[in-house]
Image (tube, rainbow, N blue to C red):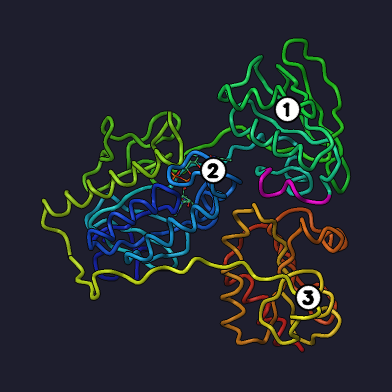
Amino acid sequence: MKDKSFSNQIAIENIVIIGSGPAGYTAAIYASRANLQPLLITGFQKGGIAGGQLMTTTFVENFPGFPDGILGPELMDLIKAQAIRWGTQLIEDDAEKVDFNQYPFLIEADGRVIKTHSVIIATGASANKLHLPNEKLFWSRGISACAICDGATPQFSNEELGVVGGGDSACEEAVYLTKYGSHVHLIVRSSSLKASAAMADRVRANPQITVHWKTEVIDAQGSSWLESLLIREIDTKKEKTLKVKGLFYAIGHTPNTELFRGQVECNENGYLITKPGRPETSIEGIFVAGDVSDTEWRQGITAASSGCKAALSAERWLSKHQLTNLIKRDPTEPDQVKTPKEAETTTKQNYKSDSLWQKGSYALRKLYHDSKKPLLVVYTSPSCGPCHVLKPQLKRVLEELNGRVQGIEINIEEDKEVTKQAGVNGTPTVQLFKNKALFNQWKGVKQRSAFKEAILELLKNP
Ligand SMILES: Cc1cc2nc3c(=O)[nH]c(=O)nc-3n(C[C@H](O)[C@H](O)[C@H](O)COP(=O)(O)OP(=O)(O)OC[C@H]3O[C@@H](n4cnc5c(N)ncnc54)[C@H](O)[C@@H]3O)c2cc1C
């Protein structure tokens, strides 16, 4: 073994898929139906969230099979369920380290070292930031990289908002934000939009959107919340202040390939290089799917299609080299999957003082005043993909703690008043209370262990 930090080895896998976007899960469907019993590392925080980029959008209108469109997170839930139904095993964590210089290949995730005969890299791409001087100060206090996730936050309601970027995402976000803000300023560096004609038309036709051409954002200003932007006209260098309470980044993505640099061949922008039109990389046995190597198409369906190609190629390569350890399944036809159901909002009629998980401000108010147990309150919005990822993790923590703590879900769109009172300004936000006192607050998706450790600490000190 070259690297001593790789320890805790286990038996050799047929195939490990890294990434759980449309590319990764489609590869998993094909690989599991070929009886390869794939292991899929979903990703957690390093390169976006589990489920990938479609978890950050509302309606996907162009994925075949859904004539009325489908919410991005719902689509990803369905593709995931299909992969699991055929026997894909999930590791809900990031791949932390890989060693493709030796064979079998080594991957470290979830505190384990995995040995595998083949790998499909499907780590997609992550949103770019502007790196403004005050960006950190106002991150989640007005600045966001996901309008779809955070747009419904009460602080943005009926306020002027900014979106930076000129492509499809920027236009989609600008149009979407007009549902919440009083006016949207789209700040574009060039003199034209890169977005598709249909999307650009929607922006031009919307009187609630002003486009600031050839303009760049210099910095963000405010006190405890973003209040304005310093913007500059690129040609004249004239600076001015634009009063907005929100700034949403839509300035493209960077491929999540840091983990593989120096091992798998990348182009100058970090995209993995494959054989033209094929999923094979510079290393035999390592295959690629989706946006991580796609500099041109970057769509859900193209990612899914490349996941299919990668899995079929990997299967052929494994059998050619007689490396496959086929798993015999009984029965051959797996059980049907059950689609996860949304929790019902708690009312006076269905409220239960000892329920593990309830929804809405009625349950929160009752438990806040009456319960002696710690309360884990998660603030979500219906279109927030990260919330989708986090909720089942939180429910698992509550189950593991056998009812010693209770959970409440607050939809920030339905319960605006309670959200404002709680000082919540983005989703997902999780607050941990006991005896009416706030002990912890987390923003964004965190590891299950972070919540569990904080709750156990609280339970130790009654
Ligand atoms: C706002 C928005 C709207 C969009 N709307 C549409 C649309 O309507 N229709 C459409 O077809 N396309 C749309 N797209 C594009 C589409 O989402 C992408 O093309 C597609 O998701 C790419 O799929 P992927 O599987 O290659 O990667 P991604 O979806 O980016 O998924 C990558 C996965 O890799 C994981 N990962 C990253 N690093 C690691 C690591 N170290 N270890 C383990 N896992 C890791 C991530 O957690 C993630 O699960 C949209 C994109 C955005 C941003």
298 is higher (above) or lower (below) than 420: above
59 or 170: nearer the eye?
59
Residue under label 2 = 60
Quarter of the image containing the N terminus? bottom left
Quarter of the image containing the C terminus? bottom right
* Residue type pointed to by label 2: Val
Residue under label 1 = 186
Inter-mark Cα distance, 2 to 3: 33 Å
29 is higher (above) or lower (below) than 69: below
SS label for mark 3: loop
Residue 347 got which mark?
3
387 is higher (above) or lower (below) than 392: above
Residue 148 magenta-drawn? yes
Task: Give the x, y percent position of residue 123.
Answer: 43, 47
Task: Give the x, y percent position of residue 263.
Answer: 33, 43
Inter-mark Cα distance, 2 to 1: 22 Å
Q: Furthest residue to the top?
A: 236
Label 2 or label 1, whichever lies nearer to me, is 2
Q: Residue at x 87, y 39 (%)?
A: 227
Q: Residue at x 65, y 17 (%)?
A: 190
